[in-house]
Image (cartoon, rainbow, N blue to C red):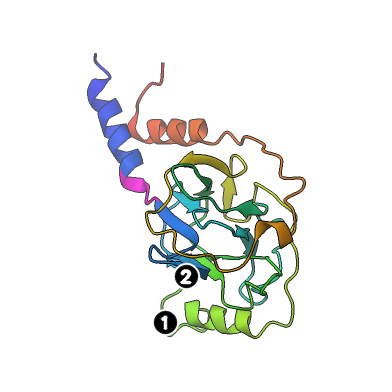
Amino acid sequence: MRFAAPISALAFAVVALAQDQTIHVGNNGTGSGLFFSPQFVNATANSTITFVFDTPSTNHTVAQSSFAKPCEPLANGFDSGYTPGAAGVAAPTWNLTVTDASKPIWFYCAQPTKTHCIAGMVGGINVPAPPATNDGSAFIALATGASSIVQPVPALSGVGAFASAAPSATAPASSGSGSSSGTSSGSSPSSTGNAAAAVGVSGGFVAALAAVFGVALL
């Protein structure tokens, strides 16, 4: 009982630090298309970005890129692997944990059918505000001006963020599935080598906060 107050303070600090966000892949709530919705979000370190693949008859990927090369995978970057969209109550989701909120995290869809990235299907986390030379509009302009899309290799660990598991059908889909964008999963690259590898960081994070608050974790 003597640890109740400090532990409550610790729990409050964890909640206060988290700035979780949800991004719909190919679905903006009113219909399907080649976009992430919202396209750009802000998030604190240790918060979770949940990508929801809730667009039927599509097959998208969330691949990390650099600002300079929006349609090419970043070295040692994350990639969800191709994930077919679903309608109903079991749309696949992919949880990405932000580990470094001090730098922008850029991503794109590598689907070559209809050249998704070149069509503007890109996004970012903690993107500089306009009129920065590397703001969201500049990133989109570079993507739409790209000549090709480079295919990534599925990976859970990225630069400034990581996922603890491959996409899984665990969350409800958006109510606005809309019509198909014409990108069928049958004509898309398959997701090979999309193995999950659990990354245990939560324990270390809580322990670090406990140290700050002087709480003994028993």
**Is residue 195 left or right of 183 when viewed as pictured?**
right
Position of residue 31 relative to residue 185, above or below, is below
Which quarter of the figure has residue 5?
top left
Q: How many marks?
A: 2
Q: CA distance from mark 1 to mark 2?
A: 9 Å
At horizontal 30% and vertical 26% (from top left) the residue drawn is: 7
Residue 138 place in picture, x, y as percent: 53, 83
Residue 174 place in picture, x, y as percent: 40, 53
Which residue range is magenta in the image? 16-20
Amino acid at the residue labelled 1: Pro
| Main SS, magenta residues | loop
Residue 81 place in picture, x, y as percent: 67, 52
At horizontal 73% and vertical 62% (from top left) the residue drawn is: 187
According to the picture, the residue beneath numbered tag 2 turns out to be 127
Residue 59, numbered circle = none
According to the picture, the residue beneath numbered tag 1 turns out to be 130
- In the rendered structure, does residue 187 fall within the stretch colored magenta? no
Position of residue 26 relative to residue 83, above or below, is below
At horizontal 56% and vertical 78% (from top left) the residue drawn is: 139
